[in-house]
Image: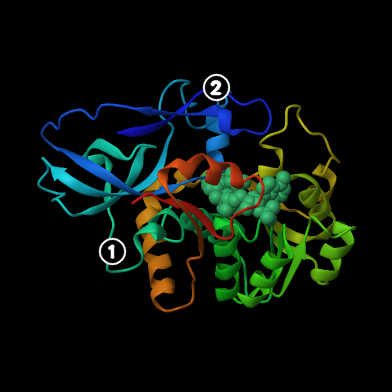
Amino acid sequence: TQAILLASRPQGTPTPEQFQFETRETPALTTGQVLLKTRYVSVDPYMRGRMSAAKSYVAPFEVGQPIAGGVVAEVIESQSDSLPVGSTVVGNLAWQEFNVADAQTLNSVPVDKAPASYFLGLLGMPGLTAYFGLLDICQPKAGETVLVSGAAGAVGLIVGQLAKIKGCRVVGTAGTDEKVSHLKALGFDEAINYKTTPDIAKALAAAAPNGVDCYFDNVGGAITDAVYDLLNKHARIALCGQISTYNATETPTGPRPEGKLLKTSTKLQGFIVSDYLSRWPEGIAKLTEWYAAGQLKGEETVTEGFDHIPAAFLGLFKGDNTGKAVVKVA
Ligand code: NDP
C-alpha cells in the first residue's frame, strides 16, 4: 500500500519536505481484523503538534513512520463478525491507501444518516469539540453574545450554528472576505476579516456592542488579546485551540489578561475533546438530530487524491479550507 511517513520534524511552518511517500506491505489478517480501503482522510491542526517531539496530550508521530489520524474506510476483507465486507467505518488509522485494523478499534458509520465524510467533521471529532466546548463549558443563554475565532473552520462553523440554535448573537472572525460573506449567509450576526481589518479591537467592539458573554477560542494571539477587553461579568471562555501560535519558533508574549479575567469573574477552561469521551454518544446523537432537522449544516472542503493529503494539511495554516478539510482518496 502507498503510505505517507513523517520524513522530518518541522521547525516553524511545515513544508512538503516533511512528508515521504513509500510503498509498504499490508500484513495478513488475523481473527478479529479487517482489511480497509481508505475513502476519506481527515487533516487537522492538532497534527502539527504531533509532528514535533514536544510532550503533549497525544504521543508525537515517529520520524520514518506513517502519519495517522481520522480516516473513513470501507471493509474489503473481514475476519470479524461485527464488521462484514462492505461496512463503512471511522477510526484512527495511518495515512495509507489500505490499513489492517482490529474491528474493535473502529466505529461503524451509519451511511444512511449522512455523507460518510461528515463523520470526520460535523458528526465526528470537530462536531464534538464544538458541542462540548460551547454547550458544556460556555453554556450560552438566549440573547447572550457568543464570539468565535476561526469561525469558518471545521469547529468554528459548528460553534456558530449551535450558538444560533441557542438563540445567541453570534460574531465570528475569519481570514477572507468570502468566508465573512459565507458566515453571514449561514446566520452569523457579524463576521470580521481579521487579515484586512486594520483595528481588530475596534471592529470586535462594534460587532459586539453588548460585550462578549462567551468566547470560543480557536486561534489565540492578537484576536484573543482584543477579546479580553470585551468580556462581560461572568463571561465564559472555552480555550479550544491556538492555531496562530502552532508554527511559532519562540513562545509568543502578549498582554497579561489575568486582571481582566478577575474583574469580570470570567471562567476560562482549556479542554481536549477526548476529556468527554464517555459522553461522545450523547454528542453524536444530538448533532445528528439537529442535522436531520436541517438546523446544522456540515460544510467541508474536499481535496481529491491520496497524493494531495500533505498539501491539504499544509493548507490549514494558509486558510485554504472553509468548514472541515478532508481528502477524498477513492
Ligand atoms: P479549521 O478547519 O479551523 O482549519 C484551520 C483554520 O485556521 C484555517 O482555515 C484558517 O482560517 C485558520 N488559521 C490558520 N492560521 C491562522 C492564524 N495564524 N491565525 C488565525 N487563524 C488561522 O481547523 P479545526 O476547526 O479543525 O480546528 C480549529 C482549532 O480548534 C484549532 O486551533 C485546533 O487545534 C483546535 N481543536 C481543538 C480540539 C480540542 O480538543 N481542544 C479539537 C479540534 C480542534 P482563516 O482563513 O480564518 O485564517
Q: Is residue 238 visible?
A: no
Q: Disc 1 designates what residue?
A: 111
Q: Element type at marker 1? A: loop
Q: Amino acid at mark 1?
A: Val
Q: Amino acid at mark 2?
A: Ser
Q: For residue 123, what is the image quadrant?
A: bottom left
Name the residue rendered at 85%, 55% in the picture.
Answer: 229
State left or right for residue 286 relative to residue 206: left
In this orientation, which residue lies closer to the viewer: 326 or 253? 326
> Where residue 110 sits: x, y (%)?
27, 62
In this orientation, which residue lies closer to the viewer: 227 or 111? 111
Name the residue rendered at 15%, 29% in the picture.
Answer: 28
State left or right for residue 157 relative to residue 247: left
Is the C-beta of the residue carrying label 1 under 8 Å from the nearest atom of ligand 1? no
Q: Element type at marker 2? A: loop
Name the residue rendered at 50%, 26% in the picture.
Answer: 60
Question: Compared to 307, does 288 lie above or below?
Answer: below
Which badge, 1 or 2, comes first in the chain's sequence? 2
**Residue at mark 1 to residue at mark 2: CA–CA distance:** 37 Å
Q: Disc 2 designates what residue?
A: 8
